[in-house]
Image (cartoon, rainbow, N blue to C red):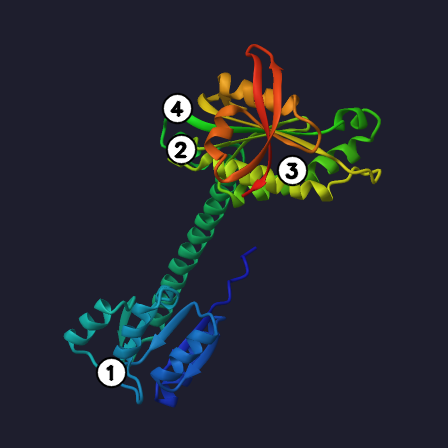
Amino acid sequence: MNATPLISKILVADDTEEIRQLLKVNLEFQGHSVVEAVNGRQALELMRAQSFDLVLLDIMMPEMNGYEVLEYLRTDANLSRVPVVVISAIQDLNSVVRCIELGAADYLPKPFKSTLLRARVDALLEQKRLRDREQAYLHMIEAEQAKSEQLLLNILPAPIAQRLKTGETVIADNCPDVTVMFTDLVDFTVWAGNASAVDVVNTLNDIFIVFDELVERYELEKIKTSGDSYMVVGGLTSSRPDHAEAMAELALAMKAASVDFHRRDGNPIDIRVGLHSGPVVAGVIGRKKFLYDLWGDTVNIASRMETLCLPGQIQVSPPVYERLQDRFMFQERGLIDVKGKGAMQTYLLVGRK
């Protein structure tokens, strides 16, 4: 059983009605849909308003001739993809060459033979179908690549993702000066032990979406979440001398946003935030489920600043305080015992001066 032929939409542009009707009869007999234009200007108006699979174009027409139409089509990225067959009584070789140079796919002299017209039309329509199919596949591939790249960016900072794409197999960097932040939700683990899985996940999702938006606003890098802990770094993948200041702004914004955080049972949620500045080692570990992470004393101290922080407060280490004391307001927390470091003077970030 033969497949049903595809119906193509063809524009016939010719100022002679008899020629238009002759072409229309031939094309409709082949099963095509035909639209007529009496001059080049009308042809362009129709092409801008409708989609065509093929154009049959006369040269000598009023208002706008075939050459002018071809010149315009060549400058339009969308219309230039539509194949054009010039059908003209002008049989001069220079005219044929000029039309081909202007982008015409073929040139038939008048009077034309129906069998030759059919063969040329069928061949060009098949070529266009193949090109359209190829373009559709390319768009699908591009869409899938975009999804893959977005997934990669959800896992890794953009500069690190780019390095992996260019073929680096081992990514390990010594970063001499960054600011690390840890944030967690006060008493969240206790509540989560008695709440439903859906409530726990939805609550964390609501809060971390807000955090993600704030991190993006201040152009910092989210590293990971672990339970109800949220880790951010500044100054890691770009030269940014104000990373401590940007992190302080982020911490204050998170604290302000936390006023609206509530568990599913309606009770409010407090956050604790800890900041520390210093050197870290950063790199990608794993092959299939890889992870970008940070290591070093700076990470450990930032974590201690958070775990030893008072509920609803932002606790910072001396290096952060020294960088920011001229631009932000602090309260002395006093000495606290930091595991592995002993007694350390810490400060609570209150706001910007």
Q: Mark 4 points at which residue?
A: 176
Q: Where is residue 267 in the image (x, y as percent from the top left)?
A: 82, 38
> Disc 3, disc 4: CB below 8 Å?
no
* Between marks 2 and 1 in the image, the one whose residue lies nearer the viewer: 2
Badge 4 amino acid: Pro
Badge 1 amino acid: Ala
Circle 4 residues within 10 Å: few <14, some 14–19, many ≥20: few
* Between marks 3 and 1 in the image, the one whose residue lies nearer the viewer: 3
Judge whether 216 appears above or below 91 on screen. above
* Residue 208 disc label: 3
Task: Give the SS element for disc 3.
Answer: helix
Label whose residue precedes the other's in the sequence (2 or 4): 2
* Image label count: 4
- For the residues marked 4 and 1, what is the alpha-carbon distance in whole angstroms? 77 Å
Badge 3 amino acid: Phe
Q: Name the residue under label 1.
A: 89
Q: Mark 2 points at which residue?
A: 165
- For the residues marked 3 and 1, what is the alpha-carbon distance in whole angstroms? 71 Å
* Viewer-side residue, 337 vs 29: 337
Judge whether 337 appears above or below 86 on screen. above
